[in-house]
Amino acid sequence: MSSVVDSAKSTLGLAQPKGTYTLPGSPIPTGTTGYGLMGLTWRPNPCSQEQAFSAMQAALAEGANLWNGGEFYGPPERNSLHLLNEYYTKYPEDAKKTVICIKGGGKPGNPIPDGSEQNTQRSIDECLKVLDGKHKLDFFECARVDPKTPIEITMGAIKKYIDNGKLGGVCLSECSADSIRRAAAVVKISGVEIEYSLFENEVERNGVLSTCAELDIPVVAYSPLGRGFLTGQVKSRADIPEDSYLNHVPRFNEENFPKNIKLVHQLEDFAERKKVTPGQVAVAWVKAQSERNGNPVIIPIPGATTAERVKENCVDVELSDMDLKEIESIIASIDITGERYPPGISELCFGNSPPLKD
């Protein structure tokens, strides 16, 4: 694929990709694992700047230089963009080593999608303002497809920033296969961000993965650890903090949790035999799907708030063909139940927009 600089193919049955990828419009190659910034600023009690910087430096040291943040990841005065500004102010030399993708496109102060030309411009301008020239806005993506605005209008507004050099490229997020095709007819799409993990694989069936492969669009896989569920740290619902977002997600409620935890138990057994952690297996499985069986390039972006956890997520675990078959049998044996988002947000997953009228 044209987006791949080096993804070595093993002749020994190992499916783990190696090397680097270059997303269309990216100034530099990125590692096969990226880094999600959401948890550093978007939670009831964010970690300190010192801890955040330590985690970010660890990610860069491990080659996870594709950083994914959001305009709404935190309050308007303290989101991913502010953190990045502070980081590059202290470590300006790292600006040339990292590629940043920022989700926006929501109404001011919240993630409710507004893909109008006016709000799209507002969102990009706000990103550029807060970054303050410390780092170029490599990629901008609307966090959800606006169900009221034709996606062609949104993409047209973003394309103007690409054409005038203020933006490197555009990515999509949580969109349908039809939305991908319509957007790609307006502007080159540099990536599609979707939830993809052992815990969530609907994109294998709804045309999103196959459409990205057909159009040579890399996929950025968020929540490859199933929102921490696949790490094995959450043994019961009692382990979920009272202020955790997971308490609002149907997949983690009283009815569904006991059913879904069976996947984690089998993953833990597999990981123990491999002498690695369940989370490392989860990330390795997503990476192993990259360019496998006709798939597009797939880059997981696990999030973490400590340097220790970042390093754990970036360990390369090689999965043989036999390993992958065993994992696939585990997936097939568990019927994952419950929506992955609460009502009101769930309806925006794999979003579509109205047709563009003449």
Image: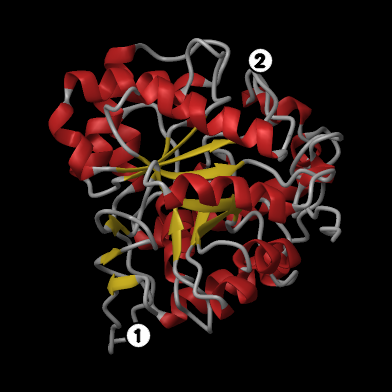
Q: Report how many numbered discs are placed on residues in the image.
A: 2
Which residue occupies the foreground of this view, 127 or 45?
127
Residue 44 vertical position relative to residue 150 in the rendered view, above or below: above
**Residue 222 can be seen in this image:** no
Q: Residue at x 37, y 71 (%)?
A: 3
> Which residue position holds label 2?
243
Under tag 1, what secondary structure?
loop
User: Looking at numbered disc 2 in the image, what kind of residue is underneath it?
Assistant: Asp
From the top left corner, tell me how far across and down residue 10 is, in percent: 28, 83
Q: Is 134 left, or right, of 156 in this rendering?
A: left
- Which residue is at the far left? 93
Please state, as top left, top right, bottom left or bottom right, where the C terminus lies in the image.
bottom right
> Which residue position holds label 1?
13
Labels 2 and 1: the sequence-earlier one: 1
Residues at circles 2 and 1 in contact by the CB criterion of under 8 Å: no
User: Looking at numbered disc 1 in the image, what kind of residue is underneath it?
Assistant: Gly
Under tag 2, what secondary structure?
loop
Q: Residue at x 55, y 76 (%)?
A: 213
From the top left corner, tell me how far across and down residue 79 is, in percent: 48, 20
Categorize mark 2 by other alpha carbons within 10 Å: few (<14), some (14-19), many (20+): few
Q: Residue at x 42, y 64 (%)?
A: 287
Which residue occupies the foreground of this view, 203 or 265?
203
On the image, which quarter does residue 141 sit in?
A: top right
Q: Is 345 left, or right, of 25 in this rendering?
A: right
From the top left corner, tell me how far across and down residue 214 is, in percent: 57, 80
